[in-house]
Amino acid sequence: MDINYQFLIKTFYLVLAAVPTTLNITAVSLLIAMPLAFYLAVIRLRPGKYIQIIISGYITFVRGTPIVLQILIIYSILPSFLNSVAKGFALEVNVFDWNPIIYAYIVFSLNTTALLCEVFRSALASINKGQLEAALCAGMTTVQAYRHIIVPQALVVAMPNICNITVKLIKGTSLAFLMTVKDMTAVAKIAASYGYNYIEAYMDVFAGYVIVCSVVQVAFAFAERHVGKFRFIK
Amino acid sequence: MLKITNVHKKYNDNEVLKGVDINVAKGDVVVILGPSGSGKTTLLRCINFLDHADQGEMEFDEYHLQMHSATADEVRKIRQKTAFVFQNYNLFQNKTVLENVTAGLIIGRNIEKNEAVDLALKALAKVGLSDRVNFYPSQLSGGQQQRVGIARAIAVQPDVILFDEPTSALDPELISEVLGIIKQLAEEGTTMIIVTHEMKFAADVATHVIFMADGNIVEEGRPKDIFQSPKEERTRNFLRRVLPQVEYNI
Amino acid sequence: MRPFNPQFILDVIPNLLPFLWVTLSVVLGTVFFGSLLGFVLARAKLSQKPLYCWLADGYIYIIRCTPSIVLLFIVFYGLPKFCLEVFDMDINGYEKIFFVLVTFTLLFAAPISEVMRSAYEAIDHGQYEAAVSIGLTPWQAFYHIILPQATVVALPNFGNSVIELMKEGSLAYTIGLVDLIGKGQLIISQNYGAYALETYLPLAFIYLLLTLGVEKSFLRLEHAFSRQKKAA
């Protein structure tokens, strides 16, 4: 099978140069989603309120629809919506000049929040109630008990799932090109379109994702060992 | 020092406490006995607000409060004056032995770290675990874990320590190491309220014995009186069942 | 901003629904072929030969790191070229759905092999030994004793994988397959980009119903199986 190796190598560097964009979207989305998801998870653990219905509806929607549809929906309404808001306030900004990565942040953090919320909720629920009671008896406030006792333990339980969600998120960012973000996929697509070298270009993207995901998974394995050091051999 | 009156508590339709009074003076060792389901543990948990009583009054030194409407601030103050030793230890799994003991001091009471470590090491020496300070709970035996639980309780120098069946999760051969420490505390004049099923131990350490059944206090008094000449039929039945071999001769 | 047109949603649904079967064929076809390949992979992972084990592990790992859309493009652009040069076979004219099925079979096989393997390992080895001890052949022991029990264990995770597959399958439109979303995109471009939201919302709603439907069906199956187990 004839492969244009020169193109393959040249494009690989181009793809590598776009790795920061992928990591950028991933990191920002996680940073937004983590606290939000944690807060929602705490709310979900409290008994019946209307807000529960809203949160579980949101989670059902995110988990029940393809992320590509979520992207298409957000990208079809948000820019013009923001534009009319800006106009409504008579602001001198042109929303359509904004870097489209903003929409990627929004879509992926909304998506990740819902997935993480479920993970946090089950992780928090898995911590024995006695841990909270013992912390309160030691004179801590509820917030202190969560911060020093409950959350560190829940984090270890949640770690493997957080890793899975992060890998999923990284793979999901391959759709950011639909919002004209110049990520690995977009860069490769553009490079390929000049000479119809699609196979080579996508092989490069493929390699790029395998590398990025591998690094992230190794990092998580280290982190897991670090935060889980108290789970010792018996 | 601590006086609670007329404590009521319901779980759904099940009335667990039906108006219980307790009076504890400094240096008292109050032991609560009774069949399972009699409300002993619930009473203990209500004192520390782990369960919220539906009704009842509490006088604890300068504090005087209604137990069903205690504010978060009042609850915290009461908890700062007490310590709780759990049936299943509830050591903080993510903290070392030393950190378990200092947590209540550093985080809960804002005591400076050096001082907290000093207090913690003293408490750990008392329970004989000075050589385990850097272990995690998962590396300890049940008896050792419970001894850390006791160290965690005494380190904060509470006015009263509440023990909820401290030995019932332990293997028989590990029970004595825990009871020995509690006994030592009793001899030093530590104020304690203890729920237990260990009758010989109860007779040994108690200054005051309370017998509970069905959410009520059936009988209370000096250990000698309760164990040797119980007045109530229910107390006699209970003691006959749990002390068949000793025949009240303690 | 153009006002939202709710009437359009009702008008567009009848145009979309006929393409539901394309989406469903992709899912059903992939579940069938993917399970076969997944079975082979699970078998390899459980095999005594380290080479097979290693190959299966490597495959599962690589797929775990691969975005669906990238594999879809590689298959779509690469497979015809590969077949032409290696087998001298021209598949350029094949239906789009063929490439979609190949891609998602490759993708689906990896997680499903893990589901199968862990379900198999969840069954006590004593079950197999007992079956062989009364004279069943190893294959009979697997088919009559292990498989029925492992199926019950695998059901919840299998259901989740099918839901994931259904959602990922929506990417098929990017190579031009006219399924639900493909048709939606066509409608939007016929309207010169207008009514995008009014088209996407019913699509999201249809997908929501599909995933909830799959979830409920698997719960029912699980329930039925565990009742059987209790009765026995």
Image (tube, rainbow, N blue to C red):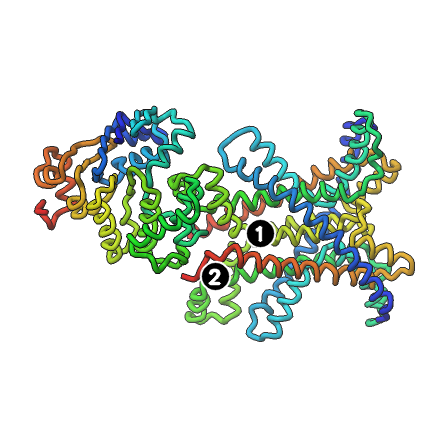
Residue A3 image point, x, y percent: 85, 69
Numbered disc in front, either 1 or 2: 1
Residue C52 falls in image quadrant: bottom right
Q: Secondary structure at mark 2?
A: loop
Q: Is residue C184 visible?
A: yes
On-image quarter of the N terminus of chain B: top left
Residue A156 image point, x, y percent: 52, 52
Q: Kindly identify the amino acid type of the residue bearing the numbered disc 2.
A: Ile
| Side (left or right) of A146 relative to C201 | left
Label disc, if present, on residue C123 of the rendered structure: 2
Residue at the image position 65 percent from the left and 63 percent from the top: C61
Q: Are marks 1 and 2 on the same chain?
A: no
Q: Is residue B86 visible?
A: no
Name above or below for residue B147 compared with residue C213.
Answer: below
Q: Kindly identify the amino acid type of the residue bearing the numbered disc 1.
A: Asn
Question: Chain under label 1?
Answer: A
Q: Secondary structure at mark 1?
A: helix
Residue B111 image point, x, y percent: 42, 42
Residue at the image position 19 percent from the left and 36 percent from the top: B211
Label disc, if present, on residue A161 of the rendered structure: 1
Decide: few, some or many residues near mark 2? Use Cα within 10 Å; few <14, some 14-19, many ≥20. some
- Mark 1–mark 2 Cα distance, whole angstroms, equals 24 Å
**A13 and C118: which one is in front?**
A13
Residue C86 falls in image quadrant: bottom right
